[in-house]
Amino acid sequence: MSKYWSQLTRTLDPYVPGEQPKIDGLIKLNTNENPYPPSPKVVEAIRGFDTDRLRLYPDPNSDALKQTLATYYQVANNQVFVGNGSDEVLGLAFMAFFKQDKPLLFPDISYSFYPVYCGLFEIDYQCLPLNDRFEIDVDDYATANGGIIFPNPNAPTGRALGLATIRRLLQQNTESVVVVDEAYIDFGGESAIALVDEFPNLLVVQTFSKSRSLAGSRVGFAIGSAELIDGLERVKNSFNSYPLDAYASVAAIAAVQDQAYFEQARDKIIASRQWLDQELSQLGFEVLPSAANFIFAKHPAHDAAALYKGLRERKILVRYFNKPRIDQHLRITIGTQHEVEALVTALKQIL
Amino acid sequence: MSKYWSQLTRTLDPYVPGEQPKIDGLIKLNTNENPYPPSPKVVEAIRGFDTDRLRLYPDPNSDALKQTLATYYQVANNQVFVGNGSDEVLGLAFMAFFKQDKPLLFPDISYSFYPVYCGLFEIDYQCLPLNDRFEIDVDDYATANGGIIFPNPNAPTGRALGLATIRRLLQQNTESVVVVDEAYIDFGGESAIALVDEFPNLLVVQTFSKSRSLAGSRVGFAIGSAELIDGLERVKNSFNSYPLDAYASVAAIAAVQDQAYFEQARDKIIASRQWLDQELSQLGFEVLPSAANFIFAKHPAHDAAALYKGLRERKILVRYFNKPRIDQHLRITIGTQHEVEALVTALKQIL
């Protein structure tokens, strides 16, 4: 605490990201990174970039990347917003849409950055509990609100809502903005991008950090109506004109353009997820059905914190949340097949 | 305007960055970029980066870059903050320190992003006029305030305050944070980093976009007391955990480590600035003494907007501000010697 901090700064409860430890031989299944490297076309694009151009500012509007995403998702260029990772995109969306008199609504078990943004931007919020099967019941959200946000698939549960359910939510909620945070959508969910032309208050946020293997590049984006995108641009241009550096754009464009590689890596992850789900179930774990690149599981006879510790001693890092309702679960990122096999071997030793 | 925007979003008056036009053969002297490419060591570091690692999140704390800067500026690691360009660093500093009951003070002619941040973060501010020679009089700032910020050298004037003057300001102002925005300091000013251990309320902000030729990489930093840096970290970790991508850190570290290249490029720019100052004076311009990589000048007999237009027709882009007190000035970035010679030739034709 310092007398020079603003009152706001004193009250903050910052987000704590998953660890990025530097341990040799560690199997890192804690931050939902992709176990496969970016596409060879990404590498080629990076190698081909003229480093002399680094002396110049990048395009503040990232028009080339927006155009690439607009073509890929079949929307207009002015329906695309890009930012420095989806965390930045979400932060700007909180300012642009959720600073309202009524509270923002989101699930009690969800991305733990949401209440942090609310603290930073002084936004009132209300957490709606997931049901006992850790599902979102969209009818709970049919109440007065200043906005709605949820991840789909949800994190850390991995459960996804179908498009028909999201449409029902949107039909019930036309007066405030609904943000669907689709960080994990490519691993098995149905994207709500299909609904943006129908609902002007729908904003879909995605990232290059997971399915595109570019967590190191910091690129996120949002797709929605032109009026929502315009609101985001106003806030962005009041904070940072040039959030995407030159390499980030080049890498992201090349990643979108290599559909075959994207599908191949995704399919391998889905296959390993299915394998891991089966193996964990056989070991007695209760595994939630996952549409993401991670699995959320608990063992009825073994304490989650102890399992986390036992795995860590065997140089396998998973994510443990010491929080109400989920302190007996582990969130396990789907690594390579080799990595998830090593995880199962280690768990067999521990159990 | 959209009914879905927050009230805040409706009131914003976003920053407008200098143009980044894509015109072949354009001489671009409008955004104070460095005319020389980044150091060959930067290129080497980028080429040597293992692209497979892009699948992983970067170090959220950018410890390697902080360590490099701490060593270079002879401060402790916890006195260094890094962000996605100095614009982001400034934005976070406004939240961390300037959200106060009393108004923020800054010069009337200054970086035009300051009032924009105030709009976004709902900070009250007061502009203090520069004197007739476009100088900051620090005694004007000896008044109740919620913080003080100014660029040194100032932009777009190019005028610098000496260290003794900044010390006087700090001695008069111990109860609120003073941010010295040193984007252009390496081109001839004295850095206030020398004063951070003496004044716990001093934050010095710098960038890799100008003297380090890395505008395309988006890296800025701040140096100050550990308590101020801690405040910035709290705000940063409530907004975006990973603002610097993997390439940006690698490039910035290599740039700091090549002192010889840095000095060589800087000295060439200073020599061209001196040459341009003389030439413009001979053409009848009134040129302010500049400690930056640009010159701020007016011609008593020629309208600045017309000169801007005439130069643009000759494919030379400079910056014109249609604002009170400075609408008869042009801000001209120091390019290569060849580029500033082309500018003088064009001006001779126009005059």
Image (cartoon, coloured by chain):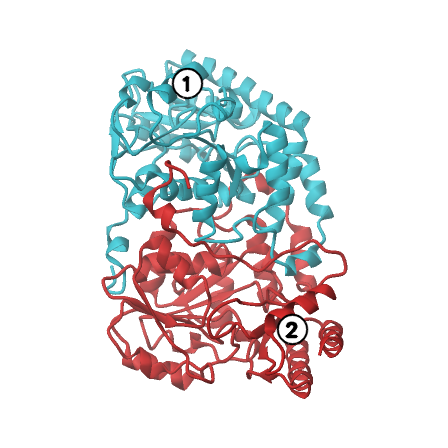
Chain colours: A cyan, B red
The answer to whether one can see residue A342 in this image is: no
As helix, strand or loop, the secondary structure at mark 1 comes to helix
- Relative to B88, is A337 above or below? above
Q: Which residue type carries mark 2?
A: Ile
> Given the image, what chain letter belongs to the residue carrying mark 2?
B
Location of residue A283 by image quarter: top left
Judge from the rendering whether residue B22 lies leftward or rightward of residue A1; answer left or right. right
Q: Which residue type carries mark 1?
A: Arg
Q: What residue do we see at 72% from left, 53% from top?
A: A50
Q: Dot 2, how many residues are within 10 Å of its Cα: few (below 14), some (14-19), or many (20+)?
A: many
Location of residue A302 by image quarter: top left
The answer to whether one can see residue A68 in this image is: yes
Q: What residue do we see at 47% from left, 59% from top?
A: B87
Residue B5 pos. (x, y %): 38, 40
- Relative to B289, is A80 above or below? above
Tag of residue B334? 2
Tag of residue A167? 1
- Relative to B296, is A304 above or below? above
In-front residue for pair A192/B330: B330
> Given the image, what chain letter belongs to the residue carrying mark 1?
A
